[in-house]
Amino acid sequence: MIRFGTGGWRAIIGDEFTKRNIQTLACALARKMKDEGVAEKGIVLGYDRRFLAKEAMQWAAVVFAQEEIKAFLINKSSPTPLVMYYVKTHELPYGMMVTASHNPAIYNGIKVFTAGGRDADEMQTRDMENYISDIDPEAVRGMEYEKALEQGMITEIYPLNEYLDSIISAVDMKAIRRARLKIALDPMYGVSETSLKTILLTARCEVDTIHERHDTLFGGKLPSPSASTLRALQTYVMDNGCHIGIATDGDADRIGIIDDAGNFLHPNDILVLLYYYLVKHKGWQGPVVRNIATTHMLDWVAASFGERCYEVPVGFKYISAKMQETDAVIGGESSGGLTVRGHISGKDGIYAASLLVEMLAVTGKKLSELTREIRQECGAIFMEERDYSFSQEKKAEMNRILLEEKQIPELPFEIERISYLDGCKVYFKNGGWVIARFSGTEPLLRIFCEMPEPEDAKRICKILEEFLGL
């Protein structure tokens, strides 16, 4: 029943996300650690604000304790990047975070991180699934929590300060202090408020927060920063004259931004802005990495600096691996996750937000001005995104059409090539493209199209939609 997708294992609470499955997964990872000879180093576990998240972390921890593997438990709800940071800096072989990130409130899940603080890759997750299949859930046992604490098999920790200090030391705090910025935060009822407020207040920013309370239903909305979910932040920025509005998803590994004019900045725009800033204003050198469904504006900006943009499948493990291979400046995806060279190897919305604030301070320009500047220098391209739910029968039909028979509709633009690296992606000779792929975290078919003209992007999506009978 436990299958890993692009963002770990996610399941509906009470359906597949159960104590038995959580402890089976923990037992499988414990045995894998023993077989690899790394059990004596221990494992760190964290959790976010989702329903049963803390309990799930403890259910997993007592299994590690029973298996004689020391478990370091972050004893307050925390951002996912904190777990990744701890794995990296304390040289642990594995880490585990209880979260379903931006999924609906009825979901919870577990992300597994490997040495260096990286997302477990496909080989690792497949290996874990094999271990899981060999375990009898009825035979899994856990030590009593209090007994594990007394024996030192479980240690409660709260390493937030060392994580925040690493970010504070990496950004230009002096420039931010001089800028006297007014910032609105929207943690979306998640775990980023303490971290972001600490960094920004230390830099003498004026900070106001909305949606900060603990709500396992996330205010009845999807805890994913998008144009539709950030309308309250948009209004707050405009009504209060803020320089920027910053939102994070449920576990703070992804961000959403509202600019000074009240516009929602697509994650594609954020990636482009940060890459442009790091190369042009900070003098960094190197390529950029994006996934197959992320803007080709990054290719254009990279080319303007004499650099290259690398394309990888969806899944941050592919981005971090390619970044390490190419020494890239930045890597990211159109869903709002990104990381920067020299930091952790996974998504970090808190560090990304801090860099954006630094960018405003150092350049002395508004976000809207910087966006216009990049488009004037490198050109503009427009994206259309659509999501479709489906039955299992419909999924099988679409999989057959697109990926087995490799059929595509008649399209009104000249095709350069077609890729099946991840889903079906058609590249047009005019610089545009369209992709249809199944989500690795939710039961959805996703279509992304980017074209020089916005109406053409909508037109291509409509053609593909009708072709697939959606």
Image (cartoon, rainbow, N blue to C red):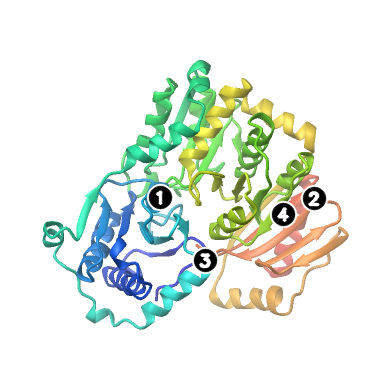
Q: Nearer the viewer, mark 4 or mark 1?
A: 1
Tell me the residue at 54%/73% (across/down).
Answer: 391
* Label 2 – label 3 distance at C-alpha: 27 Å
**What is the crowding at mark 4: few (fewer than 14 residues within 10 Å), some, or many (at least 20)?**
many
Query: Which callout, 4 or 2, points at the residue further toward the start of the chain?
Result: 4
Write down the residue under mark 4.
449
> Which class describes the residues within 10 Å of circle 1: few (<14), some (14-19), or many (20+)?
many
Looking at the rendered structure, the secondary structure element under dot 2 is helix
Query: Amino acid type of disc 4?
Result: Cys
Vertical placement of residue 303 versus 245, above or below: below
Upstream in sequence: badge 4 or badge 3: 3
- Please give the label number shown on residue 443: 3
Q: Position of residue 12 (x, y in %)?
A: 38, 65
Tag 3: Cα neighbours inside 10 Å, few (<14), some, or many (≥20)? some
Above or below, 238 against 187 in this view is above
Q: What is the CA distance from the residue labelled 4 to the residue labelled 1?
A: 30 Å
Say which quarter of the image contains residue 283: top right
The dot on residue 213 is none
Asked if the residue at tag 3 contacts the one at tag 2, i.e. Cβ–Cβ closer than 8 Å, the answer is: no
- The residue type indicated by label 1 comes to Thr
| Pointer 2 residue | 456
From the image, tell me which residue sits under label 1. Answer: 80
| Disc 4 from disc 3: Cα separation | 20 Å
Q: Is residue 244 left or right of residue 381?
A: left
**CB of mark 4 within 8 Å of CB of mark 1?**
no
